[in-house]
Image: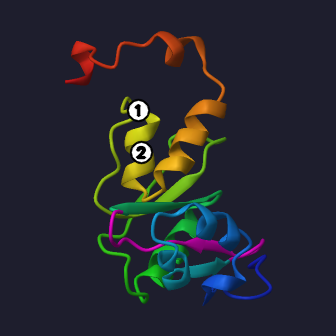
């Protein structure tokens, strides 16, 4: 028995709940328009394709089945190369569908991630000014031998 009342589907980008958020922050806002909204059970969420400075992307899902459906749907849309599902080993952490180049390693700075995902420089700078810092992020040596 399935709990879904409607099948997962792709919708136009502007139907995504978070369309305006991405459109306002991307270096190339046309990428938001080239994206697609993934409609599962909740609000449709935007998947932004790679292009220009944006080298990769991802979308998070609470269930493996949803991630698998999203990967299949994104496989029919242009701009989502190298689709892969990254299963979370933790029950309280979402599974992700990733596309494009592999994301920077977790120890890279937020500025590196911002550029990788194609955000404008002023948006990245604003994020860095307003983010909360953990004791680790405030004092970590990014040149750690473990990170080489």
Q: Residue at x 45, y 48 (%)?
A: 114
Name the quarter where the N terminus is drawn.
bottom right
Residue 39: x, y in percent? 68, 80
Name the quarter where the C terminus is drawn.
top left
Residue topped by disc 1: 109
Q: Are marks 2 and 1 in contact (CB under 8 Å)?
A: yes
Q: What is the number of the mark on residue 113? A: 2
Is residue 69 or residue 78 the one in the foreground? 78
Q: Is residue 78 left or right of residue 14?
A: left
Q: Which residues are magenta?
A: 40-53
Q: Residue at x 33, y 62 (%)?
A: 55
The picture quadrant where one finds residue 105 is top left
Query: Which SS class for mark 1?
Result: loop
Q: Main secondary structure of the magenta part?
A: loop
| Magenta span includes 44 | yes
Residue 44: x, y in percent? 71, 76
Q: Residue at x 39, y 51 (%)?
A: 115
* Disc 1 crowd, CA 10 A, few/some/many (<14, 14-19, 20+): few
Is residue 2 or residue 67 the one in the foreground? 67
Residue 19: x, y in percent? 66, 73
| Magenta span includes 70 | no
Residue 102: x, y in percent? 30, 53
- Asked if residue 47 is positioned above or below residue 133 in the image, the reply reads below
- Asked if residue 6 is positioned above or below residue 96 in the image, the reply reads below
- Asked if residue 3 is positioned above or below residue 102 in the image, the reply reads below
């Amino acid at each position: 028995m399935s709990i879904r009342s409607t099948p997962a589907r792709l919708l136009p980008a502007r139907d995504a709940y978070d369309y305006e958020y991405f459109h306002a922050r991307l270096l190339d806002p046309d990428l938001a328009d080239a994206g697609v909204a993934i409609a599962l059970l909740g609000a449709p969420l935007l998947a932004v394709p790679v292009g220009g400075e944006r080298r990769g992307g991802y979308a998070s899902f609470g269930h493996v089945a949803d991630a698998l459906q999203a990967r299949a749907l994104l496989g029919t849309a242009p701009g989502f190369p190298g689709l892969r599902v990254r299963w979370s080993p933790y029950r309280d952490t979402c599974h992700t569908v990733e596309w494009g180049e592999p994301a920077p390693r977790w120890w890279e700075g937020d500025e590196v991630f911002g550029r990788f995902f194609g955000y404008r420089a002023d948006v990245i700078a604003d994020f860095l000014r307003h983010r909360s810092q953990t004791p680790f992020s405030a004092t970590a040596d990014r040149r750690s031998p473990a990170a080489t």
